Image (cartoon, grey):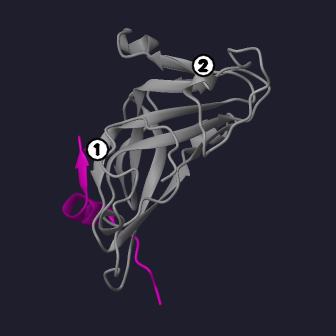
C-alpha cells in the first residue's frame, strides 16, 4: 500500500493553515510557506527556555508527569524591531515555542515534522510529535541546541517542515473524537498528563 504525501495543490485545498503563505524567496530570511510536498511553518515570538540551573538552587529533575514552569524562562521578542526578533538558546539546552500558523488537520491525514536544514546544519534540532487526524491549534515546537555554543533562533521565520500523509481510508477514531489534551491549544503549551 502506498501512502500518498499531499502536494502543494492538495495542501492548499485540504488543510486549513492560517495565515497561509506561498514559498517565495525572502532575502535574508529562513524560508517558509507551502513547498512541493509540505509546508514550512514559522516560529512565533514566544519562547520558554530551560534555565541553565534551577531557580531554587535544588537539583531539578524534568518530570513529564509533574512538569514545573519554574525550570523555564519566558521570552517574548514580539516587541522588538523585526531584525532583532530572535532568542538565544544556551549550549546543550532546549526551548519550547509556538508556530505562527494555526492548523486544522483533516480526518484522513497524519502530519509528521522534520527540521529545516539551515538550522540542522547549525546543530539545532526541531522535534514535534505527529499531528493526529482532526488535531487543530497552534503547534508547540521543541528546539534542542545540541552544540557547546549559544545558538540564535529567528522569530517569524521558517523553523520546520510539516509533511501531510493521506490515508486510504478515514480513521475509526480521531484526535478530536478522543478529546485529546492538546486539542485547540492557542499557542505554547507545556506538557500535560491526563
Q: Which residue is mark 2?
A: 88
Q: Residue 141: horizontal and vertical position, in percent?
A: 50, 41
Report the residue at 59% width, 37% height from top: 67
- What is the distance, in whole Å, between disc 2 and disc 1 at their CAs? 25 Å
In the rendered image, the residue lying farthest to the left is 13
Q: Residue 190: horizontal and vertical position, in percent?
A: 49, 38
Quick check: is 167 in the magenta stretch?
Answer: no
Residue 118 lies in quadrant: top right
Q: Relative to 71, say whether 37 is above or below.
A: below
Residue 52 lies in quadrant: top right
Q: Secondary structure at mark 2?
A: strand
Q: Secondary structure at mark 1?
A: strand
Assess whether mark 1 and mark 2 are in contact (beta carbons under 8 angstroms): no
Q: Relative to 128, say whether 110 is above or below.
A: below
Q: Residue 146: horizontal and vertical position, in percent?
A: 74, 35
Report the residue at 67% width, 39% height from top: 121
In the rendered image, the residue lying farthest to the bottom is 1
Tag 1: Cα neighbours inside 10 Å, few (<14), some, or many (≥20)?
many
Residues drawn in magenta = 1-20
Left or right? Give the position of 139 relative to 92.
Answer: left
Q: Which residue is mark 1?
A: 102
68, 171: nearer the viewer: 68
Quick check: is 12 in the magenta stretch?
Answer: yes
Left or right? Give the position of 123 relative to 1.
Answer: right
Report the residue at 56% width, 40% height from top: 142
Mark 2 or mark 1: whose residue is earlier in sequence: 2
Q: Residue 103: horizontal and vertical position, in percent?
A: 29, 50
Q: Relative to 161, say whether 178 is above or below.
A: below
Left or right? Give the position of 178 relative to 161.
Answer: left
The answer to whether residue 155 is seen in the rendering is no
Amino acid at each position: 500500500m502506498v501512502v500518498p504525501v499531499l502536494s502543494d495543490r492538495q495542501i492548499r485545498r485540504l488543510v486549513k493553515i492560517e495565515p497561509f503563505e506561498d514559498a517565495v524567496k525572502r532575502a535574508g530570511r529562513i524560508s517558509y510557506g507551502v513547498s512541493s510536498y509540505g509546508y514550512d511553518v514559522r516560529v512565533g515570538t514566544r519562547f520558554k527556555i530551560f534555565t541553565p540551573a534551577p531557580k531554587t538552587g535544588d537539583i531539578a529533575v524534568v518530570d513529564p508527569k509533574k512538569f514545573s514552569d519554574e525550570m523555564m524562562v519566558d521570552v517574548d521578542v514580539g516587541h522588538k524591531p523585526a531584525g532583532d526578533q530572535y532568542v538565544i538558546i544556551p549550549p546543550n539546552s532546549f526551548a519550547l515555542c509556538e508556530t505562527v500558523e494555526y492548523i486544522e488537520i483533516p480526518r484522513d491525514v497524519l502530519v509528521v515534522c522534520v527540521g529545516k536544514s539551515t538550522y540542522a546544519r547549525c546543530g539545532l534540532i526541531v522535534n514535534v510529535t505527529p499531528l493526529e487526524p482532526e488535531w487543530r491549534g497552534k503547534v508547540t515546537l521543541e528546539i534542542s541546541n545540541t552544540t557547546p555554543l549559544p545558538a540564535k533562533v529567528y522569530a517569524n521565520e521558517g523553523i520546520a517542515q510539516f509533511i501531510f500523509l493521506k490515508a486510504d481510508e478515514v480513521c475509526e477514531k480521531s484526535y478530536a473524537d478522543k478529546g485529546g489534551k492538546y486539542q485547540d491549544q492557542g499557542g505554547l503549551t507545556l506538557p500535560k498528563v491526563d
